[in-house]
Image (tube, rainbow, N blue to C red):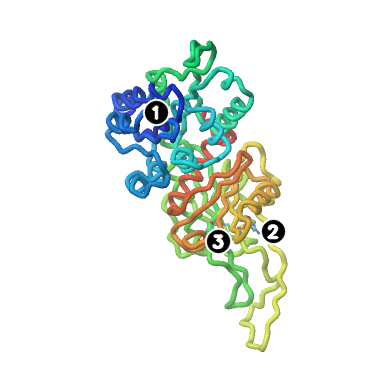
């Protein structure tokens, strides 16, 4: 039973090859997997949802806007619980939507919300297959580590001869089986970050004003600590550099406690050379008082503070970064989140930036949940609201799926 208990989300888009999709459901189930089917409107012109419901023994998702369906089979829940997403047959239309982040129905929306490995089995007329627009969309998907299951050549439903016939269902199922076998047999799957050194920064910094007062922010450290913990679970050798928080130091993680931005700068710089992945979730104060009063400042009508700039630790890391280092920043924004995140990605020479809108309820500082955009040179992934632990897992999945990270850690 090679697909033992794996949850496969099968997206069926509308083409004549839809008639073969029920065979995929049967093949996955024979291999021990579970299948949830999501159909596009055009797929339903070819095959009735009832066929898939009977074969999968699960409700079939057909509409994003059906209250009843969404409560039984919500697109986010389905996306989050899938071990793999397979789109078969995949039309040129769904491929274009997947490549460009268009989410206008259940399947395309679930795809965006799904961080599980994705497989696409294209099926179309051979002229459509050869079209540069389609080919460049496939290239985009490949760059994002989406597996393309090559279509066969032969006589097509339209009567012509060429490439575009969907791969046989038995082959598609065997691609999934091979993928999971490989993953499960490899120690690298369970602990893909074994022997990888990761530095995570977390929490706020405190900049002294006088003997009793300081400048700081609301960071609780929860986001950074969740990242450190997930990296540890993935086998990494983690070093956590933490500003003052109320959290207990995580077990089995080397933790360096700092207070000020300058102390964080020194600790990060001393250790950064050893880290292959650096994730800066800390909320570092941009300014400090140059010469804090060593006494308690006496009460007066007004108090003017003169602030000087703190070093930008992340920017310095970006400047020093070599090709074997993967650098991740965070962006705490209150407006134009994507725009400012893209600017920071570029200015600080980052491989990824995780942007949160700190004005959103339940996101950002001092709450247990977060809602983030993952922004890199391939585009933007908009994650729904979830626990900080789940966000941390998604961030690590995203990093692990990039070619650069896989090449740094030797995971192919
Ligand atoms: O700790 P929590 O309560 O769980 O909250 C999580 C969080 C909101 C703190 C976290 O999700 C977050 O957004 N962290 C980054 C906060 C921040 O400082 O953002 P920024 O946009 O000001 O800075 C951008 C990046 O530069 C950050 O990676 C920051 O660590 C880094 N930076 C900033 C200033 C500075 N002097 N040195 C830096 O390295």
Q: Which is more foreground, mark 2 or mark 3?
A: 3
* Residue 236 in sight from this viewpoint: no
**Is the residue at mark 2 in contact range of ligand 1, meaning its CB lies under 8 Å from it?**
yes
Tell me the SS state at disc 3: loop
Mark 1 is surrounded, within 10 Å at the Cα level, by few (under 14), some (14 to 19) or many (20 or more) other residues, namely: some
Mark 2 is surrounded, within 10 Å at the Cα level, by few (under 14), some (14 to 19) or many (20 or more) other residues, namely: some
- Residue at (63% x, 62% y) in the render: 261
Q: Nearer the viewer, residue 383 or 26?
A: 26
Question: Counting residues from the N terminus, which is met first, the one under dot 2 or under dot 3?
Answer: 2
As drawn, 127 above or below 214: above
Distance between the alpha carbons at the discs numbered 2 and 3: 23 Å
Question: Counting residues from the N terminus, which is met first, the one under dot 3 or under dot 1?
Answer: 1
Mark 3 is surrounded, within 10 Å at the Cα level, by few (under 14), some (14 to 19) or many (20 or more) other residues, namely: some
The reply, left or right, for residue 57 in relation to residue 339 is: left
Tell me the SS state at disc 2: loop
Task: Work out which quarter of the rendered image holds the N terminus and state it.
Answer: top left
Q: Quickly name the residue at label 2.
A: 311
**Image marks 3 and 1: residues in contact by CB distance under 8 Å:** no
Tell me the SS state at disc 1: helix
Q: Which is more foreground, mark 3 or mark 1?
A: 3
Q: Quickly name the residue at label 3.
A: 358
- Residue 64 locus on image (x, y percent): 42, 44
């Amino acid at each position: 039973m090679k697909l033992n208990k794996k949850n496969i989300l099968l997206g069926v888009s509308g083409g004549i090859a839809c008639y073969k999709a029920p065979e995929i459901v049967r093949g996955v189930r024979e291999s021990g997997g579970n299948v949830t089917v999501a159909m596009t409107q055009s797929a339903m012109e070819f095959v009735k949802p009832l066929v898939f419901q009977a074969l999968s023994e699960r409700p079939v998702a057909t509409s994003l806007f059906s209250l009843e369906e969404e409560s039984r089979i919500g697109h986010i829940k389905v996306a989050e619980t899938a071990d793999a997403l397979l789109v078969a047959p995949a039309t040129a239309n769904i491929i274009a939507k997947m490549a460009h982040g268009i989410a206008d129905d259940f399947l395309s929306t679930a795809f965006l919300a799904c961080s599980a490995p994705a497989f696409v089995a294209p099926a179309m007329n051979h002229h459509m297959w050869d079209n540069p627009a389609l080919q460049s969309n496939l290239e985009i998907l490949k760059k994002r580590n989406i597996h393309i299951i090559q279509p066969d050549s032969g006589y097509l439903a339209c009567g012509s001869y060429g490439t575009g016939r969907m791969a046989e269902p038995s082959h598609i199922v065997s691609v999934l089986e091979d993928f999971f076998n490989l993953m499960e047999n490899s120690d690298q799957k369970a602990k893909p970050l074994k022997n990888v050194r990761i530095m995570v920064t977390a929490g706020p910094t405190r900049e002294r004003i006088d003997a009793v007062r300081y400048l700081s922010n609301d960071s609780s450290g929860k986001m950074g600590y969740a990242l450190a913990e997930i990296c540890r679970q993935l086998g990494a050798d983690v070093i956590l550099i933490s500003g003052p928080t109320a959290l207990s130091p995580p077990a089995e993680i080397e933790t360096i406690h700092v207070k000020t931005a300058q102390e964080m700068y020194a600790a990060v710089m001393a250790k950064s050379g050893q880290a292959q992945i650096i994730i800066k979730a800390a909320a570092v104060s941009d300014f400090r008082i140059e010469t804090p009063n060593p006494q308690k400042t006496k009460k007066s009508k007004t108090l003017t503070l003169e602030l000087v700039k703190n070093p930008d630790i992340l920017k310095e890391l970006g400047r020093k970064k070599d090709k074997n280092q993967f650098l991740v920043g965070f962006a705490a924004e209150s407006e134009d989140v994507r725009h400012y995140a893209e600017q920071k990605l570029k200015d600080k020479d980052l491989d990824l930036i995780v942007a949160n809108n700190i004005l959103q309820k339940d996101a950002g500082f001092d709450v247990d949940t977060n809602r983030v955009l993952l922004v890199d040179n391939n585009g933007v992934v908009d994650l729904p609201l979830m626990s900080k632990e789940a966000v941390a897992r998604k961030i690590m999945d995203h990093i692990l799926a990039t070619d650069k990270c896989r090449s740094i850690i030797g995971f192919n």
